[in-house]
Image (cartoon, grey):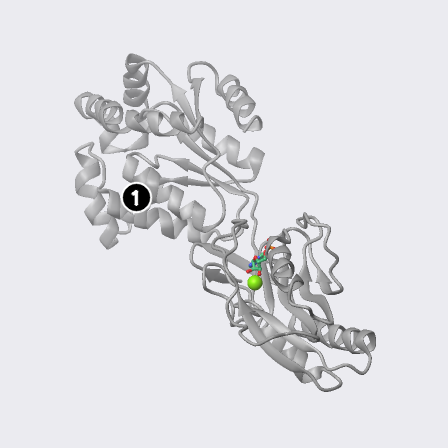
């Protein structure tokens, strides 16, 4: 697995398959044009590697030149192509083989053919190492095709993602991971922890409870724990930076997870943005924020009850409880707006039996 900018790529076509395909291309071309000396014209930047290997295995004389059109950025074809640069001499009477690393929509190829069509060539043929039949939108015939691939974004062996990856000797494809990432939201005492335990088993997700992770760190008197303790005892939020770094570590510990239930995170817009970035890095996203809605007085009652057995200092004192609820609404209700804007906010009635509430939550999650 490799990382280029914000994306992860996994191995797709190995060196041996590439070199076999290049050899076959060379042979096919030689057989086709018989005794003629072809002029290979590589389309920069991507084709530099395939042209170099193709020439080395070409069974006969050949010449080489390169042209350049506008390259495109990102993972989708921009469609716009610029002027051709690189060929000044006359190509009249030549047998030209355009060599592409990849043909996607065919836009580039079409423009090249238009440019070369009024140059009185003896013949103009096209060879491409990779071809995406599902993406190809033109009628133009491609004479020599190395490897057909599905409509996926690839890098390596000359091909890049935003400038990177051209030097890789094998080809990688964009990693797509299907994850279900849920933010379980709601004021303290709403029953998030209880529901998360049930949901994580039903959906095979990893439950990350910010509070639990902090309490573990506090108990073990880690640096992070001591810093967090002073805030939590007062019913205040732990600073974003501490929380974000801790969450990052938890997510990274669970490489390959089906998804996460975030419980107690994010609590601020900065944290929400950090989470978006973190998940985007894994080519995934937040699927939805599911919020348990419970009346304040019910919450206070529940938490005081829990305080009798939980041993949590922040559950024992009614004023601390009320402050936690207030902090929740003051500082975190903004997240409701954040996810609502993306149509990812789902409110669920949090009063009832555990089973009833689970059913309501599952209905929402199944529809995500
Ligand atoms: P087309 O004009 O859509 O056929 O695209 C041709 C150009 O798009 C190639 O020369 C590449 O520069 C770029 N391209 C198309 N698909 C990919 C890909 O999967 N990875 C990297 N570059 C690509
Ligand atoms: Mg190219």
| Quadrant observed for ligand 2 in the rendered image | bottom right
Image position of 356 (left or right of 35): left
**Residue at (34%, 38%) from the top-left corner?**
272
Whether residue 47 is visible: yes
Q: Residue at image x 73%, y 50%?
A: 139
Q: Which percent across, then down, holds residue 162?
A: 45, 59
Q: Is residue 147 rendered to the left or right of residue 353?
A: right
Residue 208 vs residue 239, the one in the foreground: 239
User: What residue sits 77% from the left and 81% below the top?
Assistant: 36
Classify 347 as above or below 217: above
User: Do we see residue 307 in this rendering?
Assistant: no
Q: Residues within 10 Å of mark 1 (few under 14, many from 20)?
A: many
Q: Nearer the viewer, residue 180 or 146?
A: 146
In this view, 134 is above or below 16: above
| Quarter the C terminus occupies | top right
Front residue of 63 and 362: 63
Question: In the picture, residue 233 is in which quadrant?
Answer: top left
Q: Is residue 157 left or right of residue 210?
A: right
Q: Quadrant of residue 119?
A: bottom right
> Label 1, on which residue?
214
**Looking at the picture, how far across and down is residue 30, in whole percent?**
78, 78
- Ligand 1 has an atom within 8 Å of the beta carbon of the residue at disc 1: no
Where 41 falls versus 185 (above or below)? Answer: below
In terms of secondary structure, where does tag 1 sit?
A: helix
Query: Residue at the location (34% across, 24% down)?
Result: 189
């Amino acid at each position: 697995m490799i990382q280029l900018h914000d994306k992860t790529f996994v191995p797709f076509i190995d060196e041996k398959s590439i070199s076999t395909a290049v050899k076959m291309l060379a042979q096919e071309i030689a057989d086709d044009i018989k005794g003629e000396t072809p002029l290979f014209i590589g389309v920069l930047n991507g084709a530099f590697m395939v042209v170099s290997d193709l020439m080395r295995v070409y069974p006969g004389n050949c010449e080489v030149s390169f042209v350049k059109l506008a390259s495109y950025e990102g993972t989708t074809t921009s469609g716009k192509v610029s002027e051709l640069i690189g060929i000044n001499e006359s190509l009249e009477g030549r047998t030209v083989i355009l060599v592409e690393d990849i043909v996607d929509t065919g836009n580039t190829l079409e423009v090249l053919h238009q440019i070369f069509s009024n140059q009185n060539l003896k013949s103009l043929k096209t060879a491409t190492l990779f071809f995406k039949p599902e993406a190809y939108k033109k009628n133009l015939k491609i004479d020599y095709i190395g490897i057909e691939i599905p409509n996926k974004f690839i890098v390596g062996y000359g091909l890049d993602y935003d400038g990177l990856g051209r030097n890789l000797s094998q080809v990688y494809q964009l990693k797509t991971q299907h994850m279900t990432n849920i933010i379980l939201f709601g004021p303290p005492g709403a029953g998030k922890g209880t529901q998360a335990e049930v949901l994580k088993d039903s959906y095979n997700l990893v439950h990350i409870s910010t509070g639990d992770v902090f309490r573990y760190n506090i108990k073990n008197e880690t640096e992070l724990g001591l810093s967090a303790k002073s805030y939590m005892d007062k019913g205040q939020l732990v600073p974003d930076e501490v929380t974000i770094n801790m969450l990052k570590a938890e997510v990274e510990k669970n490489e390959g997870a089906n998804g996460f239930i975030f419980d107690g995170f994010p609590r601020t817009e900065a944290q929400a943005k950090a989470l978006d970035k973190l998940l985007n890095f894994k080519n995934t996203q937040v699927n939805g924020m599911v919020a348990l809605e419970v009346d304040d007085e019910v919450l206070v009652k529940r938490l005081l009850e829990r305080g009798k057995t939980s041993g949590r200092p922040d559950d024992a004192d009614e004023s601390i409880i009320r402050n936690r609820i207030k902090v929740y609404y003051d500082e975190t209700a903004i997240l409701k707006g954040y996810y609502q804007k993306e149509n990812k906010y789902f409110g669920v009635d949090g009063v009832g039996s555990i089973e009833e509430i689970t059913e309501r939550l599952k209905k929402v999650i199944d529809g995500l």
